[in-house]
Image (cartoon, rainbow, N blue to C red):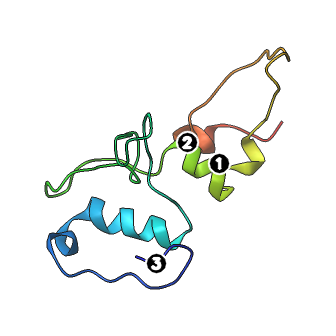
Amino acid sequence: AYVNHWRSVFNNEFCTSFSGVMHELGHNLNLRHSNENGTPYADTTGMMGFSSFQSGAPASCFNGNKNWFLGWYADRSLEIGWEEAFEGLIYAFTDYDKTDND
């Protein structure tokens, strides 16, 4: 797929892989590969690292870093500095509908 472009082209087993299609669509949304310690695809916490060719697997999405980059859930996020204190509850983005923006 082209990064930050509307076009994705498939010509192999990725055509039938949900995770492969989601990965390539991530490139269209301007996402790069998720690396771990400089190794491409090693971060498997979301769709932009290596995923799976199993049918219907994995039950995954873009990870928190990619969601932040895309600006998704921005009305429920808070950036704090290393030396700032935080007191409150932390929710996963999967609980978005159970929270408010206060």
> In what quadrant of the picture does the N terminus appear?
bottom left
The residues bearing labels 1 and 3 have C-alpha atoms spaced at a distance of 21 Å
Q: Is residue 2 above or below residue 83?
A: below
Residue, x 75% and y 18% (percent of image)? 88
Write down the quadrant of residue 8 in the picture.
bottom left
Residue shown at 61% from the left, 30% from the top: 91
- N-terminal of the pair, mark 1 or mark 3, is 3
Q: Is residue 64 above or below residue 23?
A: above
Q: Secondary structure at mark 1?
A: helix
Whether residues under marks 2 and 3 lie with C-beta atoms below 8 angstroms apart, the answer is: no
Circles 1 and 3: CB atoms closer than 8 Å = no
| Residue type, numbered disc 2 | Gly
Residue 88's disc number: none
Q: Which residue is mark 1?
A: 68
The three-letter amino acid code for the residue at tag 1 is Trp
* Label ID, residue 2: 3
Neighbour tally class for label 3: few under 14, some 14-19, many 20 plus, Cα within 10 Å = some
The answer for how far apart the CA atoms under marks 1 and 2 are is 6 Å
Q: Is residue 12 left or right of residue 51?
A: left
Q: Position of residue 44 (x, y in %)?
A: 35, 41
Please indicate whether residue 85 sits to the left or right of residue 22 in the image.
Answer: right
Work out whether residue 17 or residue 81 is closer to the camera in this orientation and state it: 81
Disc assigned to residue 64: 2
The numbered mark, 2 or 3, whose residue comes first in the sequence reads 3
